[in-house]
Amino acid sequence: MLTVVVGGFFGDEGKGKVAAYLALSKDYRYAVRTGAINAGHTVVYNGVTYRLRILSAAFVNKSAKLLVPPGALISLDLFVNEVNMLGVKGRVFVDYKTGVIEEIHVRREREDPVLKSIGSTFTGVGAAMADRVLRRLKLASDIPELKEYLADIPLMVNQALDSGEKVLVEGTQGTFLSLYHGTYPYVTSRDTTAPGILSEVGVGPKRVDHVVVVFKAYVTRVGAGPLEGEISPVEAERLGWLERATVTGRVRRVAPFNFELAKRAVMLNSATCIAITKLDALFPSAKHARSWSELPSEARKWIEKVEEELKVPVVLIGTGEEVLDMVDRSRDLGVDL
Ligand code: IMP
Ligand code: MG
């Protein structure tokens, strides 16, 4: 079974938490994280906060193999640090064709006026992607230190699916940061939607069982670009919606939940399920709820409104930072995640 987790807004929707929850509670044994090191996914598990830039948040399931696909971009030092920090050596596999970002890419980006104007994270990802397009980027198979991790990830994933294993594909960033479908030029350097994610992994669309589009209960955006209904940082602080970016530490811009954007994200990704995170930010008494009946009735009504507008079931609802602070409606709704 193949499940894709994808961001519905501008990144930072809580994909890490959703991926970690699914891996743990539904026992996914294969987890592929796409994208690159500009994206930070945060997981809070047993009181410990992990900030991930390369490996899947599914690491919390100790039986999960953690795969880095050909379409991803890593940097050697971040990769080695992350493997050591998480203590996951032995279950990490990197594709021969995964791209490798080097110091030169970061340096080149820092001098680029366009990247300055859009508020890039300056992690070298765009420059490395450009080199890949120009066929001059180093791949994982060129780096001796990565030798012990190398594997054919598309083959691993497709064989796992053939033998009935559960595979989780964790996207990075969000639909409207997509190079093709986002708010160009205020976008990242890849297609962040479900089809783009699948292409990065090397698995075809017919193999997909679930596309879980993740929306936060409000919208945030880091860097420049349009953000409809944007509120001031002071107002965001008052509402408890002020956040800082995982990778750059910048204060995130904030707006209320946007139904029109959400509808378009559902369309672009062909969503089969929705996950809403941080519902407790809208309804404080929803905090730490772990069942539908524990949610206050106004929170349930809001979720029902989301379902009515988007015409897709809301299967997972985040109610706190911890991975297991989640209302899981999959059984009630008959969704076999
Ligand atoms: P770049 O891809 O690092 O050049 O950044 C391009 C734009 O995408 C900037 O506005 C970044 O803030 C934004 N961006 C890149 N990665 C992420 C992410 O993981 N979460 C949120 N925004 C991101
Ligand atoms: Mg993030």
Image: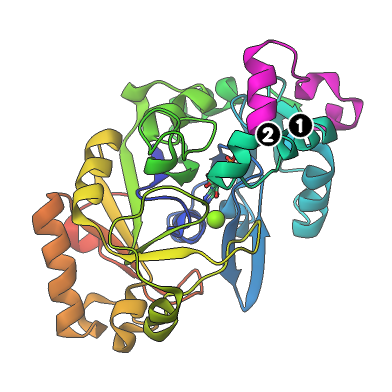
Amino acid under label 2? Asp
Tag of residue 112: 2
Q: Is residue 126 magenta?
A: yes
Check disc 1 and report the residue beneath it. 108
Total number of numbered discs in the rendering: 2
Regarding mark 2 in the picture, which secondary structure is present there? loop
Percent coordinates x, y for residue 238 in the rendering: 40, 85
Q: Nearer the viewer, mark 1 or mark 2?
A: 2
Q: Residue visible at 61% across and 38% down?
A: 115
Q: Which residues are magenta?
A: 124-149
Percent coordinates x, y for residue 159 in the rendering: 52, 24
Q: Is residue 7 magenta?
A: no
Quarter of the rendering containing residue 110: top right
Q: In this orientation, which residue lies closer to the viewer: 245 or 186?
A: 186
Decide if residue 4 is in sight here. no
Percent coordinates x, y for residue 142 in the rendering: 84, 19
Image side of residue 76 versus residue 123, left or right: right
Q: In this orientation, which residue lies closer to the viewer: 236 or 206?
A: 236
Amino acid under label 1? Arg
Tell me if the residue at label 1 has its CB under 8 Å from ligand 1.
no
